Amino acid sequence: MGIHGLWKTVHARYGRSLHSFVEVIDFGATLLVDASSFLFHLLNKQIPTIYKRYSFPRECGGCYRLIDEVIRLEIKRLRQRLGFGRVIFYFDGPVSYYKQDTKEKRRKQIQQQWEVIYELSVGLARSSDVSPSQLPLPPLAFRVLNTVLKDLNVSIVSCPAEADQQMAIDCQRLNQSQLDGKTIAYCYSSDR
């Protein structure tokens, strides 16, 4: 789900400069990543802006070799450019009773996205008129993500419910273990 308004706050405090924000991150810190948000953000926002040369026609279902490459580049960027020593990916578990409304909204959104694919395939819509967020994630994107994470020896946590809750608990636990009060764990999630 992400933390609504997080990046507005970061930009207000540190400006638009990534360098200013990176200066406050302790080198070697741990980054806790919501896998769903990571993939959504990477395919809908990062590829069109940072990884432009890797763009691919989503209406064709996705190019998994390129998705693999972009995931590897992003993890490398998180480790090297941003200085995170450890990256841990959290995958959502089964949807709890309290999240049934959210699950239903997501199901309807995905159904609408597949309807756009159908409209494109029969010529009722043009790909130039459709934004990436109007299209579903490529069906095997999560499998590619999982394979890349295992290949790069990135830690994976399968959560009993939504990943956000487990990430918050782990982040708080890691940061409380610091005697000097430094922040050593950060959460990476989408700010939709």
Image: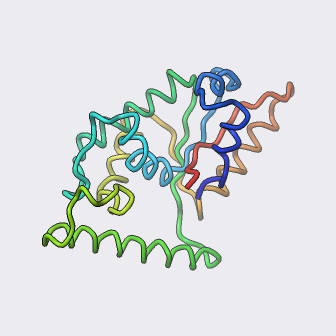
What is the quadrant of residue 135 in the picture?
bottom left
In front: 164, or 4? 4
Residue 3 in the image, given as x and y percentages of width and height: 66, 53
Give the answer, above or below, for where 69 lies relative to 57: above
Residue at (60%, 74%) from the top-left corner? 99
Residue drawn at x 66%, y 37% as measured from the top left: 11
Residue 6 at x, y percent in the picture? 67, 47
Q: Quadrant of the N terminus?
A: bottom right
Residue 25 lies in what quarter of the image?
top right
Answer left or right for 22 relative to 70.
right
Image coordinates for residue 38, horizontal then vertical, percent: 48, 47
**Residue 52 in the image: x percent, y percent?**
32, 36
**Residue placed at 71% from the left, 25% from the top?**
24
View extreme (front): residue: 129
Question: Extreme left residue here?
Answer: 122
- Return the residue nearer the eye: 180 or 83: 83
Viewed as shown, does residue 143 lie left or right of 159?
Answer: left
Horizontal side of 80 relative to 168 (left or right) equals: left
Residue 74 lies left or right of residue 113; in this view the side is: right
Q: How are the colours assigned in the image?
A: rainbow
Q: How many labels were placed on the picture?
A: 0
Q: Nearer the viewer, residue 91 or 122?
A: 122
Of the 4 image quadrants, the one containing the C terminus is: bottom right
